[in-house]
Amino acid sequence: MERRAFLSFFSVGTAAALSGKFFYRGGAADKILDFEDMNTSSLEISDSIKVMKSRAPSAPEFLEAFTSVGAVKESETEVFLADTDSPSLNSYVKKMRNYESPHERDVYLPKNKHSVLFSTYNRIGRVQTLIGHGNFNVLGFDEMLKIGRRYSSVGTFTRAETDFFEGLFSANATEYGFLGDKVTEKLTETIQKSHTKKISKTGHFLFRGRSERLYKKLKDDIGASITLTSGIRSVVKQTHLFIAKTIQSEGNLSKASRSLAPPGHSYHGIGDFDVGKVGYGNKNFTEAFSSTDEFKKLVDLGYVSIRYPRNNMLGVRYEPWHVKVV
Ligand SMILES: [Zn+2]
């Protein structure tokens, strides 16, 4: 399917779009969502994106603001940023701190796509049930289709569902406000088993080589209280999470993309991984993780980088748990 056709799916955040709420509440209720990461016009949207991009990182006030922000309290930061006389930067930062709220220029999936959103979500969910959570993390697109054809408990993916899947993958995520790179070019890319290592007791995989070595080293240095909470995610896995997030966000694709990379844009597909404190549950995917001893130790190691630091300019909330590898 052409990207242009998919982009016509979008509608812009208005009171009318929000009136679709009841649909999501009713429709989502029959399925428990698997949240690993729990937790205006299109012209105006692209204009606002241009403004954000032009502000980073060459603008002197950006560099000045963001190198000083680190340890400053949030309330002080607000004042400081307000003093920069940069309204677009200010509103961007506020939006990222309030990533869970809908914002004026958010992009929505139109109502006529709600039904295929749910049927795709449910069918992928049945694949996951069939093959198990661990294997599902590394499942490829073609393999997924084959499973649908072969097992009646899943059922063949319909044309509308595969078009929707492809549309999500080929969409230009900057339209949502997500500004990170596309790191997986092809929808049908597969993850070779021989390149992966299953990490015991976690249900997750890591790529052999850099990812595996870094994880082992930080575990040796920090101890048994830190664990892998999400490793390799194939395009299928990321798409399933993104659809879940879109359902949870009542069709707001922009809101979904502020806390979950759209399909093809996740560094989990090429080496990054998430860590958390053992026994901390879903709080590992909230800012509360940054107050744990495990996080403090992680920072003190000096060799671990965080992919989405506070005040990043990628359109993504602060994710202290997400370790950058590549
Ligand atoms: Zn992550």
Image (cartoon, grey):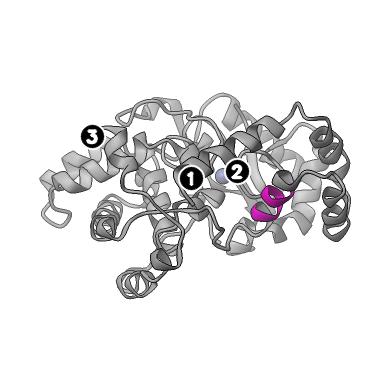
Residue at 32% x, 71% y is: 23
Quadrant in the rendering for residue 314: top right
Q: Nearer the viewer, residue 286 or 48?
A: 48
Q: Quadrant of the N terminus?
A: top left
225 displayed left or right of 24: right
Helix, strand or loop at mark 3: loop
Q: Main secondary structure of the magenta part?
A: helix
Image: 255 above or below 66: below
Q: Residues within 10 Å of mark 1 (few under 14, many from 20)?
A: many
**CA distance for labels 3 and 2:** 26 Å
Question: The magenta stretch spans which residues?
Answer: 90-95
Residue 280, image x and y in percent?
Answer: 64, 63
Quadrant in the rendering for residue 29: bottom left
Q: Nearer the viewer, residue 162 or 138?
A: 162
Residue at mark 2: 315
Helix, strand or loop at mark 2: loop
Q: Is residue 232 visible?
A: no
In the rendering, which numbered label is found on residue 193?
Answer: none
Image: 247 above or below 220: below
Residue at 32% x, 31% y is: 187
Helix, strand or loop at mark 1: loop
The answer to whether mark 1 and mark 3 are in CB contact below 8 A is no
Assign ligand 1 to one image quadrant: top right
Whichever of callouts 1 and 2 sits on the residue coming sooner in the sequence is 1
Name the amino acid type tagged 1: Tyr
Q: Is residue 91 magenta?
A: yes
Residue 140, image x and y in percent?
Answer: 31, 35
Residue at 15% x, 57% y is: 153
Whichever of callouts 1 and 3 sits on the residue coming sooner in the sequence is 3
The answer to whether mark 1 and mark 2 are in CB contact below 8 A is yes
Residue at mark 3: 1
Residue at mark 1: 176
